[in-house]
Every structure is written in structure tokens, then in C-alpha cells.
Amino acid sequence: METEIRNTFKVELEIFYRMSGVMIQMIMHDAEKQNSTIKVDVNFMENYKALQEMKEFEKLIVAEDFTLTKKPLKKGGLPGIGSLEEVA
């Protein structure tokens, strides 16, 4: 099941990337037809930390290091639902 989910995730991620590119092309084409100017703040696109995080995430998916196995909570984590006392 994990392999199936991994493959589905990878395919959906690729589709999302392609759709994003098509969307940008459509916006640029419409703006050109309307003689509009599009101003974009490229600072976020040049945010190397965000780009690096995305690159590392993609590597996890491709390298199959990504797992759906539940990891144990750290000490001091949230209490379980049944552990809370009812307040009157």
C-alpha cells in the first residue's frame, strides 16, 4: 500500500508542476492580449531556503526514503484524547 501511495503522490506532484506551468503561460498570454503589465515579487522565488526544502522533499520521494510509518511522539507531546479529565 505504501508503494501505491508513493507512486500516486509522485504522479500527482508531477501533474501539479505541469499545471502550474500551464497556468503561468495562460496568465502571461491573457495579460499580453490585454496590454497589461504583470508585476511579480521574485524575492520569494529566490528564497533559497524554501527552494532547498522543496528539493530535499523531492529527493525523499524519489529516493523512496519517504515513509508513512507513524513516528513516536516526542516527550511533552500532546496528551491523548482519553487522558484529559473532564472539567465541571
Image (cartoon, grey):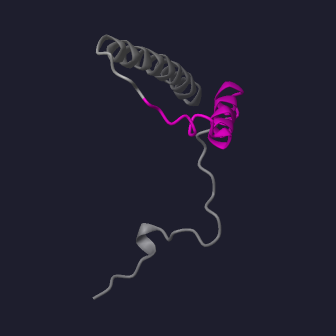
Residue 77 lies in the magenta stretch = no
Q: Please tell me which residue is depicted at 56% across the width and 39% down the height of the picture.
A: 44
Q: Where in the figure is residue 67, as x and y percent of width and height? A: 63, 38
Q: Which is more toward the observer, 88 or 28? A: 28
Looking at this rendering, what residue extends furthest in the bottom direction?
Answer: 88
Q: How many marks?
A: 0
Residue 48, image quadrant: top right
Residue 59 lies in the magenta stretch = yes
* Drawn side of residue 68 relative to residue 30, left or right: right
Residue 64, image quadrant: top right
Q: Where in the figure is residue 72, as x and y percent of width and height? A: 63, 57
Q: Where in the figure is residue 18, as x and y percent of width and height? A: 48, 16
Up-down relation of residue 6 to residue 15 (above or below): below
* Drawn side of residue 59 relative to residue 24, left or right: right
Q: Where in the figure is residue 30, as x and y percent of width and height? A: 32, 15
Up-down relation of residue 82 to residue 66 (above or below): below
Residue 68, image quadrant: top right
Q: Please tell me which residue is depicted at 45% across the width and 75% down the height of the picture.
A: 83
Q: Quadrant of the N terminus?
A: top right
Q: Please tell me which residue is depicted at 45% across the width and 22% down the height of the picture.
A: 20
Q: Which is more toward the observer, 48 or 17? A: 48
Up-down relation of residue 71 to residue 11 (above or below): below
Q: Which span of residues is magenta-colored?
A: 39-65
Q: Which is more toward the observer, 38 or 52? A: 38
